[in-house]
Image: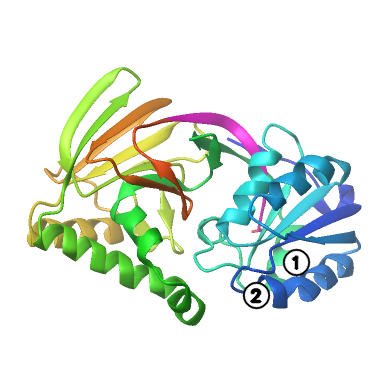
Amino acid sequence: MGFLALPILGVLKRALLIANPASRSGARLVDAACRAITDAGVSCDVILTERAGHAREISEGRGRHYDIVFALGGDGTVMEVAGALAGSSIPIGVLPGGTGNLLARALGISRNIEKAVKALMEGHVKQIDLGVVLGQRFAVAAGVGIDAAMVAETPAWMKRRLGVLSYTIIATKAALRAVLFRQFFLARVEVDGEMIERKAAAVLFANFGSILEERLTFGPDIAIDDGLLDCCIFSPFNLWDAVRIMWRVTRRDFRPDRALLYRKGKRFRLETVPVLPLQADGELLGVTPVDITVEPLAAHLLVPGR
């Protein structure tokens, strides 16, 4: 599902490159990205973002005047572009320039900018679902608990020096803290009318099934184009539970487990005690309670040729 049989290079004439110079690598990659696009025979206009929300404004105002829009920056920049163009047929090319680059990694896009542009230009368009929470769209996942703590607590200097490794370090620290000091929260999750209540260390609403080149898998049978999101509740009540969960998500082992609970759905309501911050695709958006929904096949993304 979700694939469009479009001869990309045959239909693309004009590209808009929206780049965030404040992202980890955005500023130094702009020229290389534009050159790679023009080398593929496509004219390229470049606009640099100046503030949070600017990529959304640019996409809303000018994105539909181009055959393709490239987003160069972190996941926040990418989702501003994808959110603004949701529901249109404008294909989006994701170019990694941030720290986590979750969506680019999930799509198998090279971190080498020239290789990334070439692979996307030789690729195809795939329609994917988008999640919606607190008025913002997300592509990969939204959640509370360990993952939100990771986003909130990773310092800027560590992201600049270590890249995605910095998130791994802080996430491990947050997970150990939650287990060793029993810093769990009460999660009340309504999934299409079903009410679930249990103690948890993390609750995730996933659209993509895995991240970091499939090193971590959130749950079983998660699809990006099925019109559903997958609620994953992680409840490791001791160190052994935490080790077992980590082993399973790295080995794609999703047999029944007391510390794992999965539910697919279209509409969710999440309440927590205490109130917790929520992240979506690596950006802190607000706090619980929140409603989460899905927009089926809302975004058209370029994916690398195979």
Give the quarter of the image for residue 162.
bottom left
Q: Is residue 301 magenta?
A: yes
Give the SS element for disc 1.
helix
Q: Nearer the viewer, residue 187 or 297?
A: 187
The colour scheme applied to this rendered structure is rainbow
Asked if the residues shown at circle 1 and circle 2 are in contact, with their CB atoms under 8 angstroms apart, the answer is: no
- The residue under the point 47% across, 73% down is 156
When asked about the image quadrant of residue 127, the answer is: top right
Q: Amino acid at mark 2?
A: Asn
Q: Is residue 203 left or right of residue 242?
A: right
Up the image or down, 204 lies above or below 71; here it is above
- Which residue occupies the foreground of this view, 169 or 109? 169
Q: Is residue 128 magenta?
A: no
Instruction: Please name the residue that numbered disc 2 is placed on.
Output: 112
> Where does label 1 land, which residue?
118
Question: In the figure, is residue 171 to the left or right of 107?
Answer: left
Q: Is residue 59 left or right of residue 210?
A: right
Q: Residue at the location (46% across, 78% down)? A: 157
Q: Earlier in the sequence, mark 1 or mark 2?
A: 2
Q: Residues within 10 Å of mark 2 (few under 14, many from 20)?
A: some
**Residue flagged by tag 1: what amino acid is it?**
Lys
Residue 246 location (% of width, % of height):
23, 60
Which one is closest to the eye, mark 1 or mark 2?
2
For image coordinates 91% across by 63% down, the residue present is 41
Looking at the rendered structure, which numbered label has been put on residue 157?
A: none
Vertical order, 229 against 283 (above or below):
above
Task: Read off the magenta span.
Answer: 292-304
In percent of the image, x 43 and y 43: which residue is there?
286
Rendering coords of residue 126 (x, y %)? 65, 43
Give x and y (percent) for residue 245: 20, 56
Q: Main secondary structure of the magenta part?
A: strand
